Amino acid sequence: MLAGLVALSTGILFWQSGAVSAVLEPTGSVYTADEYGNSISRIDLATGQVETVPVPISPHNVDLSADGGILAAVGEPAAMEAGTGHGHGAIEHGTDAGGGLLLVFDSDQLRSRPLAEIVVGKHPAHVIVDAGGGQAFVTQSEENSVAVVDLSAKKIVKTIETGRYPHGLRLSPDGKEIYVANVEDGSVSVIATAEARESARIPVGAAPVQVGFTPDGRLVFASLRDENKVAVIDTARREVVTKIGVGRNPIQVFATPDGSRVYVANQGGQADPDDTVSVIDVATLRVVDTIRTGKGAHGVSISPDGSLVFVTNIVDGTVSVIDEAARSVVATIRVGLGPNGIAFRKAK
């Protein structure tokens, strides 16, 4: 296993397992929401350089527009000292401070002022940008709702009621629905994007934190933090068809682009953080591998070609880079304090 990046000046990563097994030239950028450090980090995979930029929030999550030009980040105002944030139960780190902010950046110009600073509701947790890049959807955890934000008008245009304490959310591959994990009532809300309303609410289990679609949209995987399991939802039937045991306190989930596997980050608890990622085989709905990362494995993103998996380690302040084919960590990259959400952008 490689403990860090090799030959950064050339932008080449040498994947090792005892001896060099392959040489790849990764491109693109990875962005992390550094909640404890009140910052956003950008990893340039071609050069290995990390840029960490202070922001006026404690960012909990980030997302990119489909073309990669816009980076959206949500969190509470950074009135507190670096080293705190809002969390969602498994590892607590801070207190709430009223309403939150959605920041919109040019993804190439993080050090410039945000293109927009939009006031949203209390305890904003996650944000996604729609396929057209015109709207963002923000979970407002303490208000039991999702805010629909017009990015051109720079304001909330509608609020959609959900279950209690909505947290993670993802857009379906066809863009017609959003699935939202409601932590406190053990459900997943289904939002019809065209009507901007909740069309269904699916019971899933204890403390769902985030969801992830398979690329065909047929299945949704929901992490159940307090059960140490992942619920598998059949989207046509809108019901849970099985649950899969994973590591302790699973948080984010992400499917590979070919739909064959789902990666689950297991964060663990405050006193005893976990440091693993569970790999689920979609065909059999079984865990086929467990990969050791850093302490507090939290966020997951995967490159569009499926070759690399990126995992934030919220306790260690690092990102683990996993060779998906070998299913092993090949690099560990230090970013800002408390990296939480994560997003990948293809090279332009």
Image: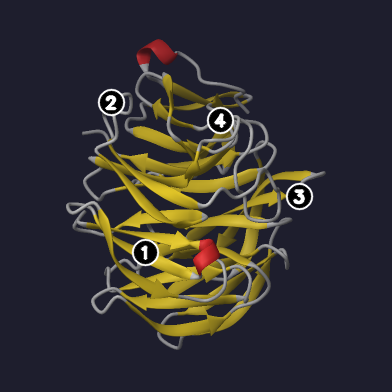
The three-letter amino acid code for the residue at tag 2 is Ser
Residue occupying image coordinates x 18% and y 54%: 153
Inter-mark Cα distance, 2 to 4? 18 Å
Q: Nearer the viewer, residue 141 or 32?
A: 141
| Proximity of marks 1 and 3: CB atoms separated by less than 8 Å | no
Residue 189 position in % (x across, y down): 47, 76
Real-space Cα separation, disc 2 to disc 3, in angstroms:
36 Å
Q: Secondary structure at mark 1?
A: strand
Q: As rendered, which of 5 and 131 lies closer to the eye?
A: 131
Q: CA distance from mark 1 to mark 4?
A: 26 Å
Residue 256 can be seen in this image: no
Image position of 33 with respect to 259: above or below: above
* Contact, mark 4 vs mark 3 (Cβ under 8 Å): no
Q: Earlier in the sequence, mark 2 or mark 4?
A: 4
Q: Which residue is mark 3?
A: 269
Pointer 2 residue: 112
Q: Which residue is mark 1?
A: 147
**Residue 49: which numbered mark, if any?**
none
Element under disc 2: loop
Task: Give the spatial CA distance, label 1 vs label 2.
Answer: 26 Å
Q: Nearer the viewer, mark 1 or mark 3?
A: 1
